[in-house]
């Protein structure tokens, strides 16, 4: 007989036998003395049958508790997988910021400064040829202005990109994948927080446990984010295995175990969904060979830095060209005077 069939059979039998026992007790109570033997016999038989049915239900509760605890093990294992992939994604995104994004911003600033100087050189050069400057002092003032403005333009670009960096400093914001269904179907967040404080934090906090610091940081991050799915998973992990109460009403114990099993099943599905989503965001290479990904990023960083160096040399080159426009101006008008 399947577990579900056994549960239904003994549940119905216990309810029926308890009703029969209540009826026979009521019948016995009508006799002040000299209770008929057949009533006593019926009372003993129903009591024995009820004890047997309740014993069987206790065995069922033990079997169900075993299933619940196996499900708990899967939740704990899946939570570990989620933390592993989450940390790997965090490391990759931090590496991407350090090796690609920020050097890329510096390269962008250098390119803009070089382009600005190059454009201004050509503008001033053409203006000299057209005779747009009234005298040497006016040209000198324009050269100073252009060189100063070049630095200001770069600083302004840097401020804009600093704002972009602030937005990018939270690379895991894209992983805020708590859905409405997650929140609606999880137990209330207030109760979760209370239970999390009571069950989980004392077992990972440095003042009350010997748990590694890394575990405390990970757990406390979940607590700060008030993530209901991860909080409930940690509660299940640190609460420990489910042990049925042998002295409890077996029907009440059954209801509690069935409720717990359904809750664990729902949580496991959502947690597995989290793992699937986060793995989907990682490329196959990021999953299989993170060291190679890191090496590739470092190589790209070196390439970007080499381009920044080349742009820096060009910046110095065009600054020098702009500064030498004064000499060109003097030579240009000196040759003009000689030709006249």
Image (cartoon, rainbow, N blue to C red):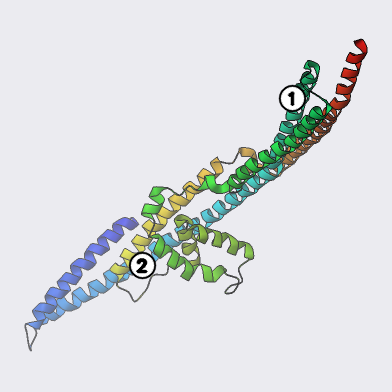
- Say which of 254 and 58 sits in front: 254
First of labels 1, 2 by sequence position:
2
Residue 53 in the image, given as x and y percentages of width and height: 27, 69
Q: Quadrant of the N terminus?
A: bottom left
The answer to whether 69 appears left or right of 165 in the picture is left
Which residue lies at the image location 39% right of the left edge and 70% below the top edge?
244
Residue 186 in the image, given as x and y percentages of width and height: 39, 56
The answer to whether 37 appears left or right of 8 in the picture is left
Dot 2: element? helix
The answer to whether 68 appears left or right of 103 in the picture is left
Contact, mark 1 vs mark 2 (Cβ under 8 Å): no
Rate crowding at label 2 as few (under 14), some (14 to 19) or many (20 or more) other CA atoms within 10 Å: some
Q: Which of the numbered marks, if any, corresponds to residue 59?
A: 2
Q: Which of the numbered marks, if any, corresponds to residue 185?
A: none
**Marks 1 and 2, how far apart at CA:** 86 Å
Rendered position, 10 above or below 269 = below
Which residue lies at the image location 65% right of the left edge and 49% below the top edge?
91
Residue picked out by circle 1: 119
- Say which of 291 and 145 sits in front: 145
Answer whether residue 136 is visible to the viewer in this image. Answer: yes
Rendered position, 178 above or below 127 = below
The mark total stands at: 2
Rate crowding at label 1 as few (under 14), some (14 to 19) or many (20 or more) other CA atoms within 10 Å: few
Which residue lies at the image location 41% right of the left edge and 54% below the top edge?
265
Rendered position, 268 above or below 289 = below
Answer whether residue 38 is visible to the viewer in this image. Answer: no
Which residue, as the protein is rendered here, is positioned at the far top? 340
Residue 113 in the image, given as x and y percentages of width and height: 74, 33
Q: Quadrant of the C terminus?
A: top right
Which residue, as the protein is rendered here, is positioned at the far bottom? 33
Dot 1: element? helix
Rendered position, 290 above or below 131 = below
């Amino acid at each position: 007989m399947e577990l579900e069939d056994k549960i239904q059979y003994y549940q119905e039998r216990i309810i029926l036998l308890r009703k029969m026992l209540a009826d026979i007790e009521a019948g016995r109570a009508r006799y002040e003395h000299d209770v008929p033997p057949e009533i006593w016999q019926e009372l003993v038989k129903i009591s024995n049958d009820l004890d047997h049915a309740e014993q069987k239900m206790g065995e069922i509760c033990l079997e169900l508790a075993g299933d619940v605890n196996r499900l708990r093990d899967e939740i704990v294992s899946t939570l570990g997988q989620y933390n592993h992939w989450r940390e790997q994604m965090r490391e990759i995104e931090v590496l991407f910021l350090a090796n690609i994004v920020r050097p890329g911003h510096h390269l962008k600033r250098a390119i803009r400064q070089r382009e600005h100087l190059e454009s201004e050189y050509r503008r001033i050069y053409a203006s000299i040829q057209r005779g747009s400057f009234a005298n040497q002092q006016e040209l000198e003032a324009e050269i100073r202005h252009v060189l100063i403005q070049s630095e200001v333009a770069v600083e302004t670009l840097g401020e804009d990109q600093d704002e972009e960096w602030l937005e990018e400093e939270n690379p895991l914001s894209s992983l805020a994948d708590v859905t409405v269904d997650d929140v609606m179907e999880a137990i209330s967040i207030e109760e979760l927080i209370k239970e999390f404080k009571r069950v989980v934090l004392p077992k990972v906090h440095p003042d009350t446990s010997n748990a590694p610091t890394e575990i405390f940081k990970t757990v406390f991050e979940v607590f700060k984010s008030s993530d209901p799915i991860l909080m409930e998973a940690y509660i299940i992990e640190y609460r420990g295995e489910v042990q049925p109460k042998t002295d409890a009403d077996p029907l009440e114990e059954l209801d509690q175990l069935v409720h717990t099993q359904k809750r664990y099943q729902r949580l496991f599905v959502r947690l597995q969904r989290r793992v699937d989503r986060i793995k989907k965001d990682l490329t196959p290479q990021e999953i299989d060979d993170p060291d190679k990904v890191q090496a590739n990023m470092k190589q790209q960083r070196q390439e970007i830095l080499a381009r920044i160096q080349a742009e820096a040399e060009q910046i110095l080159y065009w600054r020098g060209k702009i500064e030498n426009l004064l000499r060109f101006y003097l030579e240009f008008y000196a040759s003009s005077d000689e030709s006249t």
